[in-house]
Amino acid sequence: MKASQAVIVQSVDGALISSKVAIENLLEAAAIRGAKPIAIKKQIGSIQLREEILGMPIFDKLAGPMYGGDGVVRYEDADAYKVLSA
């Protein structure tokens, strides 16, 4: 299922904040957070990626894209990634 929504998770003053964004507003939402697109997520070799992730932008200041559920792609800032990956 293609992504129709993105979730951006940020750490703000130690609290994790999730923002839901329509996929057509993702570039603008990332820019507001100071993140710039640097590439597009493509399939590499035989590694299988979920359909939600394929074709999604990769940003310089956000980890992702990651699967966030059916039709959802997730991005995390560095601090949120550290907390959620621990």
Image (tube, rainbow, N blue to C red):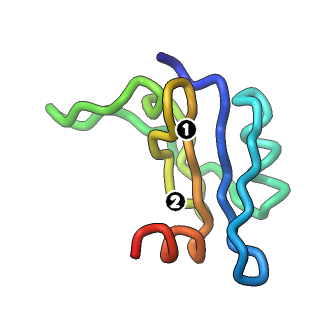
Residue ID at (25%, 37%)? 44
Q: Is residue 63 above or below residue 79?
A: above
Badge 2: residue crowd in 10 Å (few <14, some 14–19, many ≥20): some
Q: Position of residue 74 (x, y in %)?
A: 56, 46
Kindly identify the residue that appears in the image at 79 percent across and 61 percent down. Answer: 33
Residue 15: give x, y in percent of width and height: 72, 75
Considering every residue shown, the one lying at the far top of the view is 1
Q: Position of residue 61 (x, y in %)?
A: 62, 65
Q: Is residue 34 above or below residue 73?
A: below
> Viewer-proximal residue, 74 or 43?
74
- Mark closer to the chain start, 1 or 2: 2
User: In the displayed structure, would residue 7 be above or below residue 18?
Assistant: above
- Quadrant position of the C terminus in the picture: bottom left
Q: Nearer the viewer, residue 3 or 69?
A: 69
Residue with the mark numbered 1: 73
Element type at mark 1: strand
Q: Amino acid at mark 2?
A: Ala
- At label 1, the amino acid type is Val
Q: Which mark is drawn over residue 63?
A: 2
